[in-house]
Image: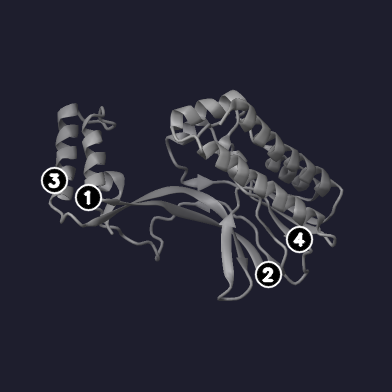
Amino acid sequence: MTTFSIRSTFDILNTHIDQLVAEIKNADVKKASFYALPKATKEDEKVAPEEIQVKKYEGEQALKFCLQAYQDLFLQDKASGKLVQRYPGLLLINDRNNNIKSRLQAVNKAKDEFKKAILEIENNDARFEAVHAAVPDLLTLAAYRKIHFESETPYSVRFTWMKKHATKVLSKKVALEMLNRSSNYANPRMIDQEQWLQLVEQEKYRVASLAEDTKLRIRRPTRVTPEVNVRFSAQNRYHVSAALPFIILNPNPETKLGELSNYTQNESHPRKRQYNFLVDRIYLERF
């Protein structure tokens, strides 16, 4: 994958996004809502927030912020390069000729093509260098994320906060290889190196004592994120990321619309499951 081909693929994507923004500006926008979240800074990379304040905008100002969100693909001063800013919002647009729908499909296809082109470079370091040589300061995760929309008539479209888990299934052998690599790291905690090595040895012993065919799983909790819940019926519903403003095409006035409220971490949620991890440090459990 050459610098020229990466840049060409990105330029196609960027052109579709710019055309989408121009077309929405000229479209019949029935409603616009935007929920501004605090800016993600480099300091936020270390500590997940326990509270998130949301500021709601409506009308022309909300539309302006929604369109800017679709075009926000680059690293800004003092912004985090690991935590991509999220822009929950909602646009209701009349699209009788399906022009906006076609453009959204083209944008999302271009995003897929760009991601596919980048992931052809297998080495992470080489991938990083290639992307940033072709498109300096690009936030690749921002370029990848799709613009979700609905062209049917849902019963409701609501917002919520969700904390997911990053899941990876692995064998006993792979788990031991991971722990062996940990032995070579300088300890990340406020303990001396000898205590760190003792801790890792204890973890290795727990895993080594398992049967050879034991399947293991890492369920690492990720940061809380805004989500859009789309419901047609009790059985027919789905949820998608609210990282970018959600679009309802040809909206029905009967569709019930929700808002994104402030987030406060709740440690005593009644549905919260208590996990008994084999290795707490890396969220390793039997699968």
Specify few, some or many for label 2: CA neighbours under 10 Å numbering under 14, 14-19, or 20 or more.
Answer: many
If you read the primary sequence from the N terminus, does the residue marked by circle 1 or circle 3 appear first?
1
Q: Which residue is mark 1?
A: 172
In front of the other: 171 or 241: 171
Disc 4 residue type (three-letter): Leu
User: Are circles 3 and 2 on residues that touch, CB within 8 Å?
Assistant: no
Disc 3 residue type (three-letter): Tyr
Q: Which residue is mark 4?
A: 249
In front of the other: 123 or 48: 123
Q: Where residue 139 sits in the image (x, y, percent)?
A: 58, 34
Disc 2 residue type (three-letter): Pro
**Corner quadrant of residue 212:** bottom left
Q: Which residue is mark 3?
A: 205
Instruction: Single out the mark in the foreground, 1 or 2.
Output: 1
150 relative to 170, above or below: below
Number of the label disc, if any, that sits on residue 260 = none
